[in-house]
Image (cartoon, helix red, strand yellow):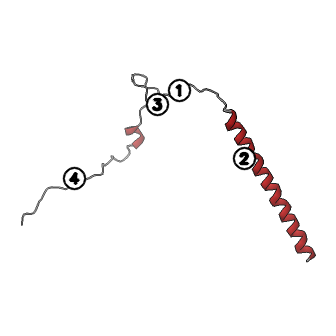
Amino acid sequence: MEVDNKKPSSLLTEVPAGRELSDVYLRHPANESSSDSEGEEAPFQDVEDEQEVETFRRVLQQQRDMQIKRAKEAEEKKKADANG
């Protein structure tokens, strides 16, 4: 049986002490020499979808109604416990 004396390859990469990973992996944001469009955002367009707005309002109102209902139930229970 042969013994392999080679150092096993590591899947981990060592970073010298004092070296930040961000220095290694992040490109400076002011680097405009690149011709690719990676990282660029499309201009913001404020488009309101009427159905989305109405759905949001309806859900918000349901939450308010539920909060009021729970408060009333808690008040009734408190009165019943005090009387009972």
Query: How far apart are the two marked residues, 4 and 1, measured between alpha carbons?
Result: 43 Å
At label 4, the amino acid type is: Ser
At label 3, the amino acid type is: Gly
Residue at left 70%, top 42%?
A: 56
Residue at left 59%, top 27%?
A: 44
Q: Please indicate whether residue 52 sits to the left or right of residue 4 in the image.
A: right
Which of the two discs, 2 and 1, sits closer to the camera? Answer: 2
How crowded is the residue under tag 1: few (<14 C-alpha within 10 Å), some, or many (20+)?
Answer: few
**Any mark on residue 39, and which?**
3
Q: Which residue is mark 4?
A: 9
Q: Which residue is mark 1?
A: 42
Give the x, y percent position of residue 1: 6, 67
How crowded is the residue under tag 3: few (<14 C-alpha within 10 Å), some, or many (20+)?
Answer: few
Query: Residue farthest to the right?
Result: 83
How crowded is the residue under tag 4: few (<14 C-alpha within 10 Å), some, or many (20+)?
Answer: few
Is there any visible trace of residue 41 in the rendered image? yes
Circles 2 and 3 in contact, beta carbons < 8 Å: no
At label 1, the amino acid type is: Ala
Query: How far apart are the two marked residues, 4 and 3, measured between alpha carbons?
Result: 34 Å
Query: How far apart are the two marked residues, 3 and 1, measured between alpha carbons?
Result: 10 Å
Q: Which residue is mark 2?
A: 59
Asked if 82 appears above or below 62 in the picture, the reply is below
Secondary structure at numbered mark 2: helix
Q: Quadrant of residue 26?
A: top left
Is there any visible trace of residue 20 in the rendered image? no
